[in-house]
Amino acid sequence: MKNLSLLTRKILALCGALVLAFLDQLFKYLVVIFISPMNLPQVEVIPGVLSLTYVDNPGIAWSMFMDHPEILTILTAMLMLVLLVLFFTKFVRSGVLMVFLMLVLGGGLGNLADRVFRGSVVDYLTLEFIDFPVFNFADCLVVVGVLLTLVWVMFHWFKEDKTKLPEHAAASTQADSGERELVEKHSQEDLDD
């Protein structure tokens, strides 16, 4: 993969995001076809841990902003556009970062498709062991992608801080070491006398 050009790797990552968005839509379609008609409150997958629950959510987590789904659709579309533009800038060069952003794009596009074509997001995953909102595969992609991206950015930020000192800092560090050598030399001479 390293032999591929940067643009080719970005296009492949974008195709990966589209595949993830397609998988998200497939999962949601299956939930709507098979779980929605049953009118069951929950279908247990792993007892006490995970169940499937069909929910149409026009808002976001904890059903916030339910009264303005059109604003959420516009905001989601704008965020996806900004992320796409950022993705194709010179700042995104690392293959690892491309994969993390691919997760965010895939999840964001999956939920955006719901907002545009359904007017609300289909949520279906319920964690039974904690009080947590019903969510979906796209939400998982976005959360994992954002967290990994933040960790990556922080790691590289601190790594660059340690390896790339500004010129004035490097010069002052060299001056400090020169002063230390001079002091040590004079101290040694004093001891010898």
Image (cartoon, rainbow, N blue to C red):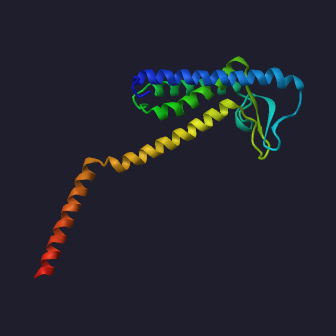
Q: Position of residue 16 (x, y in %)?
A: 56, 24
Residue 39 in picture, x, y percent from top left: 89, 27
Query: Which residue does the image show at 68% across and 25% down from the upper left?
Result: 24
Give the answer, above or below, for where 168 lies relative to 145: below
| 88 on left or right of 141 | left
In front of the other: 185 or 85: 185
Q: Position of residue 53 (x, y in %)?
A: 81, 32
Which quadrant: the C terminus?
bottom left
Residue for point 20% across, 59% down: 175
Judge whether residue 70 can be spotted in this image. Answer: no
Name the residue at 75% across, 39% down. Answer: 133
Res 54 seen here: yes
- Measured as percent of width and height from the top left, residue 144 is found at 60, 38
Front residue of 15/80: it is 15
Picture quadrant where residue 111 is located: top right
Residue drawn 47% across and 24% down?
10
